[in-house]
Image: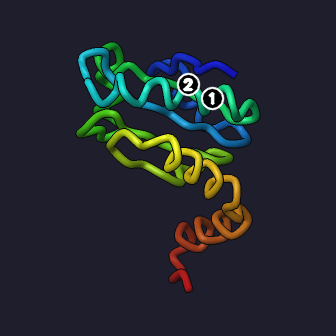
């Protein structure tokens, strides 16, 4: 699957869907973004079950501000609507593949249980 363009208008619907969604926040003028772009594209081709989206931070400054993006590229990973990863910096291919494996292996039942506990005011153990 090729990457999709994510904007302020479709960000919420994109990251709230079931499954894994990876978002690359980038800008054309950013050297590390241009280096990471082909790595992100290759991962999108190799993982057709994952949604890969790109947010142009220049065209979507309000979204970048709302997400508190302070440095680009920034990579965010969501699974079943829950953000599991948010980090600035270009990842090498091996690290991106490792991250994808880790996101696949997350026990989402445990994550949802922790969220429910946090929302109810109980302490997590």
Instruction: Give the camera-side residue of 13 and 120.
Output: 13
Label ID, residue 21? none
Q: Classify 92 as above or below 124.
A: above
In the displayed structure, would residue 39 be above or below residue 57? below
Residue 124 spot, x, y in % from top left: 54, 81
Front-lying residue, 74 or 112: 74
Q: Is residue 94 left or right of residue 110?
A: left
Where, by quadrant of the figure, is residue 75 drawn? Answer: top left
CA gap between label 2 and label 1 equals 5 Å
Compared to residue 82, the image places residue 108 above or below, namely below
Q: Residue at x 64, y 19 (%)?
A: 2
Dot 2 lies on which element?
Answer: helix
Residue 73 occupies which quadrant of the picture? top left
| Helix, strand or loop under label 1 | helix
Give the crowd class for mark 2: few <14, some 14-19, many >=20 residues within 10 Å: some
Label ID, residue 41: 2
Residue 29, percent across and down?
24, 17
Pick whichever, 27 or 57, lies toward us. Answer: 27
How packed is label 1: few (under 14 Cα within 10 Å), some, or many (20 or more)?
many
Percent of width and height locating residue 45 = 67, 26
Q: Position of residue 1 (x, y in %)?
A: 70, 22
Residue at 44% across, 25% down = 37
Q: Identify the residue position indicated by label 1 in the image.
A: 44
């Amino acid at each position: 699957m090729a990457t999709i363009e994510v904007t302020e208008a479709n960000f919420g619907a994109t990251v709230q869907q079931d499954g894994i969604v990876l978002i690359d926040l980038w800008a054309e003028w950013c050297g590390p973004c241009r280096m990471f772009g082909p790595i992100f594209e290759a991962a999108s081709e190799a993982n057709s079950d994952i949604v890969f989206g790109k947010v142009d931070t220049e065209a979507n400054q309000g979204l970048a501000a709302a997400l508190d993006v302070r440095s680009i590229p920034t990579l965010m990973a969501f699974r079943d609507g829950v953000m599991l990863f948010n980090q600035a910096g270009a990842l090498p291919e091996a690290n991106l593949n490792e991250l994808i494996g880790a996101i696949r292996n997350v026990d989402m039942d445990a994550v949802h249980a922790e969220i429910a506990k946090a929302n109810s005011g109980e302490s997590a153990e």
